Image (cartoon, rainbow, N blue to C red):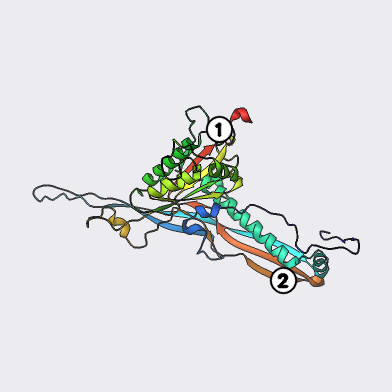
Amino acid sequence: MAFNAISRISPSFVEPKIITRYQQRSGAFAALSTGGPQVKIGSEDLMVYQLALDLRSQVSHGQSAYNEIGGPNFTTHQAQAATYLVRSRANFDHHDTAAASGWNISLVDANRKAMRGGIAQFARTALLYGVSPSKGEGLLNAVGATALTFPADAEGKTSVTGMDPAYQAQEILTLIGDLQSRINAVAQGAVRVVVLAPQRVIQAWKMKIVGLLSYQRPGAGTNSVSGTVDAVAAEGGADVYFAVDDTLIGKGQGGTDMVVIVAPELVNPQEGPGTINTNEFATLQNFSEDATAQYFDMAAPREINSPMPGGATDMLLEQRMTAGWVKRPEALTLLSVPYLEPSAG
């Protein structure tokens, strides 16, 4: 019995607030286009499909007209992602409810929140690691993503705790700049970039101060690694957001920590100097700016309550979703970095 009987000395005082399990609220969903899962699919949809169109434009040129004239060549394909029905169930009767109330707990609400939390944790796992990793599901299994290891600094240090803070800031900025180049976002408007890593990595980057002689901008000698990245990246057209997820501990190459750097949405600039647009094909109808995505059938799990023999209640929560789907792998960098130097454990 989870809610057993309680013995107390009288008189006494009972603090009404409960000490409950406290878990990390993952920031992984910030790595998705639109900043979270897209509620688009139906509850019975088994697959999600998206059409893709590529082209190679050809023209002919000369001082006089001639018969052989080049034209556009189109290539089409259909991308797809499987959906998964996630379910959780709890059974209880009025005796269980009464026992829980003795602990100042609403059993119905406790079951509901516990199951919703479990489904959310599954969604996070599906987003990062996929349900069927061999099919390229999940951000960490994306085919074509850029996978790197953090290079050593001038003193040969390779870890978050050992490397020079200014060096780390510069390397992160370089990676963000490379990502902007791969998605053609340099000098094209602000692009949202999410840096997702374990708490210990983000905490180090937010607390380690960049040296006075390494950062010659307002705040020099007082800014942190992440603060330096924020300030410099903003000038370079990137809006950087740092998010945490501790399941990334040990998920990098050789058991190092994984850092996910992603631009969840493309920048599709259609305004600029002059009237000639070499990206005019992107003005075609229904252009998708999504680089990453995850689809849900509803914003929150569906709750189904059914009576059972003996006056018991069956509470069922379910939600259909896809795994994390990287539609444009050029917008994703997977960076492996040790947290501690090998000699430090």
Work out how far the residue at label 2 is from the one at label 1, CA to CA, in angstroms: 57 Å
**Type of amino acid at the residue the image marks with label 2:** Ser
SS for dot 1: loop
Q: Quadrant of the C terminus?
A: top right
SS for dot 2: strand
Residue 104 seen in the current view:
yes
Total labels drawn: 2
Q: Nearer the viewer, residue 75 or 271?
A: 271
Residue visible at 55% across and 34% down in the picture: 159
Q: Residue 31: image x %, image y %?
A: 50, 52
Q: Quadrant of the N terminus?
A: bottom right
Give the vertical position of 222 relative to 297 (above or below): above
Q: Residue 328: image x %, image y %?
A: 42, 50
Q: Residue 70: image x %, image y %?
A: 20, 50
Q: Is residue 265 left or right of residue 21?
A: left
Residue visible at 72% across and 54% down in the picture: 21
Residue, disc 1 = 162
Q: Earlier in the sequence, mark 2 or mark 1?
A: 1
Residue visible at 15% across and 48% down in the picture: 61
Give the vertical position of 241 relative to 164 (above or below): below
Q: Nearer the viewer, residue 130 or 94?
A: 94
Q: Residue 236: image x %, image y %?
A: 38, 47
Residue 123 - label:
none
Disc 2 and disc 1 in contact, CB within 8 angstroms:
no
Q: Is residue 116 left or right of residue 197?
A: right
Residue visible at 43% across and 47% down in the picture: 231
Residue 142 seen in the current view:
no
Label 2 crowding class (10 Å Cα cut-off): few <14, some 14-19, many 20+? few
Q: Is residue 61 left or right of residue 343?
A: left
Residue 306 - label:
2
Tell me the mark number nearer the camera, choosing from 2 and 1: 1
**Type of amino acid at the residue the image marks with label 1:** Gly
